Image (cartoon, rainbow, N blue to C red):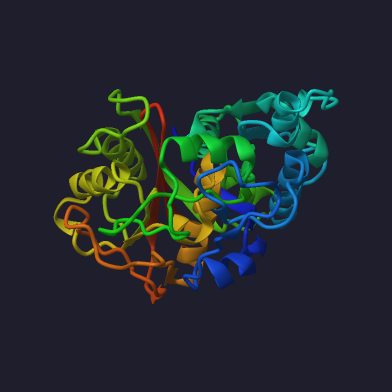
Amino acid sequence: MSREVVVTGFGVRTAFGTGADAVRDGVFDGRPAFRPITRFDTAPYRTAVAAAYGPLAPMREVLAEVGGAAAGMAALPKGARAAVLVGTAGDFTGLTGFWRAAESAGDTAETVPAWQAGALANELGVRGPRLAFTNACVASATAVVHACSLIASGRADIAICAGGYLVEEENLAKFGSGLALSHDGMVRPFCADRSGLLLGDGAAAVVLESAEGAKSRGARPLAALTGWGAASDAHHVARPHPKGVGLATAARRALNRAGDPRLDYVNAHGTATRHNDPAETRGLRTVLGPDADSVPVSSTKSTTGHLLEASGVVELVITLLAIRDGVLPPTAGFTEPDPGCDLDWVPNRPRRAEIRRAMTINAAFGGANTALVLERA
């Protein structure tokens, strides 16, 4: 028998600051966080704007902050047995310095993704499996998918899932050279005049556990994670299938597991890139069917920027807040919709709504796709 999975704690950090209220003040208010980058010299690069503030912090400290907040909210005791699953590419503070400087950058162990999972587990004082996921922009969402499978099947009672990305030079250069970055300092998903994505700082962690386990230790469920799915496009290394086949498959799997196809909101991947947005629209239309015109969909990357490996878990927290607050986060900066992107994008302003069940979806290079379904506890 499959066990119910619930969320009992979370921590989140974006360019708006740390905690849920910072997300509410920025993301839910529809206020983009994009500003000139000051943490390194942007002269060599095509774009000098991102949702990044202050110096580049060590990833271990950022993950410890959000992980500690999640464990504290869940009242998770030190020494608890919990799996720790992290979506990350490692820590670029050491990696970039190592390759760019002629002199030694010192200990580069933190650049290894698996090191981050172990460091977080040690910081939180928990025992159990430690896994790192590196499949690009679905990394932390894949961590959640795997954690749900562990808990539902009885192989784990508690899992801490985290992900982090901080804007740095290597990815700014890569996305810039691929002409994927917006040239005007704004991200306008699903709009006819969209010009690309911008990167953003982000990190989050969630504590997941079986419903009966949470009840037995007196933990309060914040929401139920009733559906999860993953699938591959098997189409192209960087472009999604034009009909959103992999995304639709992942979403169907999540909804089938949830046992109910009805949705009150979808937090889209929404990168504001030429190929992603219409493919995602087609995939969502396939999944939503006759309800496609009535289900609100928005892209919170229009405010936070693209958080790469952290996208899945940060957007899961945003979706959780939407359910609990009864507010739809808007697609900020919205102008004229692309004719090929014809859904309700919640343009520019938040909207009050009764949200019982919501889905958050992510996609990544390599054709990877994930979908997570949250329901009100």
- Above/below status of 376 relative to 105: below
Report whether residue 321 is seen. yes
Q: How many marks?
A: 0
Using the rendered image of the protein, determine whether residue 152 is visible from the camera's viewpoint. no
Apparent side of residue 79 relative to residue 24 in the rendered image (left or right) = right
Check the image and name the residue furthest to the front. 43
Left or right of 295: which side holds 100?
A: right
Name which residue lies at 30% across and 68% down.
335
Tell me which residue sits at (62%, 33%) in the image. Answer: 85
Where's residue 264, x and y in %?
32, 62
- Tell me where residue 262 sits by quadrant: bottom left
**Whether residue 339 is situated above or below residue 286 in the rendered picture:** below
For image coordinates 41% across by 40% down, the residue present is 179
Location of residue 281 in the rendering, given as x and y in whole percent from the top left corner: 24, 49
- The quadrant holding residue 365 is top left
Q: Residue at x 63, y 67 (%)?
A: 22
Quarter of the picture holding the N terminus? top left
Location of residue 61 in the rendering, given as x and y in whole percent from the top left corner: 78, 44
Q: Locate residue 210, reporting x and y percent.
A: 57, 42
